[in-house]
Image (spheres, rainbow, N blue to C red):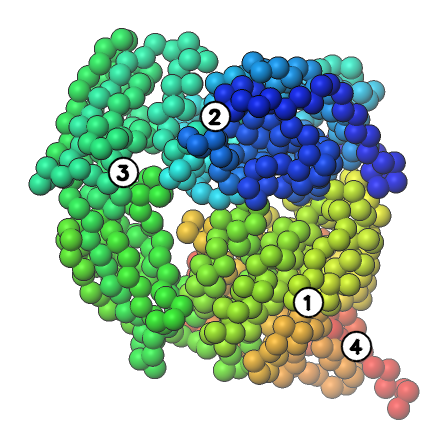
Amino acid sequence: MKFSTLNPALLGITLLVSGSLLSHAGHASVSITKGKTAIPHGNATSNQDLTIQNDKLAFAIAVDSAPPWGVARGCIVDIANVKADGTLSNDRVAFADFIPNNWSSWPNTYTKIDILKDTAEEAAVNIKRDFGETEISTTYRLFEGSDLIRVETTMTNKSDSDLALLSGYTLWPDSGYKFAVPRNHTIDKPLENRWLSDRFVGYDEEWAIALHAPYMRETKNQSRDLYAAHILSPSQSMTFSGDYQVLPRGNLAAVVSAEIKRKGLKSGTIQAHISTQEGQAVEQAAIVVSQNGVPYMWAMGDGKNVAFTLPVGDYEVYATGKQHSDSKTRLITVEENVTQTLSFDALRAPGKISLDITDEKSQQPIDAKITIEQGNQPLIEYLGARTFFTDLDNIGNAVFGLAPGEYELGVSHGAGFNAKSTIIAASVDANKTTTVASAIDVKTYPTKHGWYAGDLHHHADVLEGSTNPKNLVRSQLAAGLNVLFVSDHDSTKNNDTIQTLADTRNVPFIPSIEVSPSWGHFNAFPIDSGAQLTVDPGVDDIHSIIEDVRRMGATVIASNHPYIPYGYLSSLDKGSAPGGFNPSIDLFELNAVVNNEPTVNKAHQFWNEGLPYYFTAGSDTHDVLNQTSGLNRLFVYTGSKPDANAFAQAAKDGHSYVSFGPVIYPKNVMFGNTLKLAKAQAQTISFDLVAVNGLKSVQLIGSDSTATTTATNKQSAVNSVVLEDKKLTGDHDYVSFKVPQASGWVALIVEDNEGRKAYTNPIWLKLVDESQF
């Protein structure tokens, strides 16, 4: 779909607030308060914002504050629990709103706020906004004594043509863990979803927020977005409804109870008793419930007892606790209005692992990542981790608690790039520490050749990021990265902290920021210490954004994931990027988790035109416990250990390549440089190639102008040609290519035996006219 471009910075945003704005004194009653929210660490900081509260919860609507990711004002930006003493917990969410079309750019010219009801029993606020050629009207309701924020949205097509949309509510927690919508795949139709529920839950030990979405037909982003595909004809409307349920504990029993009530399901009750083999209480005792092997919910207990309701049906259940062993799984049938009692009395208390990891060649301790490959992997993530890292100060050592049992642990340093992961066996006993040692066979050391690798798209704990700065550093070092990098959304709050940690380990750090309008995300680096973003990504255009990040010290600006729905190049194609194209962007990202083919092809088009727009690389990691830092990375040649400016300049100059695995060492010509040619003098370029997973092939590619007339040349993409294709074997090889006698460019694509590739920036070719001499 294509919307006309409407620049809110030029047209202005209309904020119409009506109603009594009465703030009720009693916490048990419902209140609406105008002004900066009282929710600790809240993002609703304007005097025009609204906070709605009862005795269970509080939430804030950004009336005038800028929401994250450049979406239109009028959404929920803060949700908190009300504690027993009446005080508010910290903010639990980055964002909760109705998404009109799968995070596509959001042309918006007005936001109208109308308070429909403001009594001690009920608060109701309506928000009307435009989304291109549609109007979106959302009403939020909160009732006295309720833990549910009720939402209803009507979307109306104001255009003269049909609109194909993917819309629905979203819930993006700003900390904690995620429990996706449970689904089952049938054996005969493995790609067909059979949803066991219609709710997503963000949670931690002391809170949970569930998004109930009865309309949902599709999930995105780990179920944080619950969508329905629909077509709106001219003047047609469609209404969505759902609930945000706010709870004071990471316990899904109340979530399922609410689900039973809203669906009118028949149900029965489970009462369970849980203890250790010695008859002791289990810390944070829980019952985990599955259907057909798919986790459906869990219920937490008080002391040794757990009680909860389930819809009528057949289930598998087991008992567990914090770092305790799991019980055996039992099959149960829940019958209507029947209470059944279960007893689990054989759980074992936690044990510990102490692990020392070294480089096999040097025998020196190295940073590493440890994952549970086989053994107890807790479903409830605050009861036990599945991923661990070595200590920053005591390099190579990790000590952590595990449930008793037999384990296979994956241990890695620079996995897939510098070395293969290794598997070690460990046996954990209750109340004991097991000591294990592991050596990693490191195959290549890029810094010895002057190459430094960075993951140039990585988040810490801003907005939906859930990685604290210390874990970011531990994860990036364990990934074998040679420079540290952070790019939080519209924030530099973690830059100085990570700089201090980097200095402690004597590792270069590249401070960045990801400026995040709804029509494109941009990493700018390096950023000066203390510099703050002053533009509003929700309303300002590309030219203002680039001017602001240059003021902050950035010498490099990268367009992240350019062709996803809210990528910059996608928005340019749709005409929805305010300001259009700004040619001063330097780099285009090959992202670890999206389809990069359109970006590669676009880069080749630029190179064919002689334009030096180069590649960058990033994993877009937000949660190092469940995602992989350095899944892909940018190798940059600086010769010696760089500071932030030297690294940035080398990336800007194209002295770099993107890799998902293979490592490349140019021998006589650097990527980004120009090789001058004479027709009568053939020239050769050479490379050392390394792949810990084994080399499969290398292609020399180039522009049409560099192609010869030989039949071996073949089109690899719209804007490039394969000039030569070599099959490789082993984990190390030396290759040479004769350079075409023509102006243009050449580059490499190297592939390993696991299908992981490396994409180089171009070597420019310039044919010199010999007659001039």
Give whichever of discs 3 and 2 has the lower sequence position.
2
Query: Which mark is nearer the camera, 1 or 4?
Result: 1
Residue 253 percent location from the top left of the image: 35, 25
Answer yes or no: is residue 735 visible: no
| Label 4 vs label 2, nearer the camera | 2
> For the view shown, which residue lies furthest in the bottom direction?
773
Q: In which quarter of the image is the C terminus?
A: bottom right
Label 1, label 2: how far apart the Cα atoms are:
42 Å
Q: Which of marks 4 and 3 is nearer the N terminus?
A: 3
| Distance between the alpha carbons at the discs numbered 1 and 3 | 45 Å
On the rendered structure, is 566 left or right of 224?
A: right
Q: Name the residue under label 4.
A: 766
Check disc 2: other Cα within 10 Å, few if <14, some if 14-19, many if 20+: many
Residue type pointed to by label 1: Asp
Q: Which of 106 and 650 is in front in this view?
A: 106
Q: Is residue 544 left or right of residue 34?
A: right
Q: Label 1: which residue? A: 528
Secondary structure of the residue carrying tag 4 is: strand
Residue placed most toward the observer, 583 or 164: 583
Label 3 Cα neighbours within 10 Å, binned few <14 / some 14-19 / many ≥20: some
Q: Label 3: which residue?
A: 284
Q: Mark 2 points at which residue?
A: 56
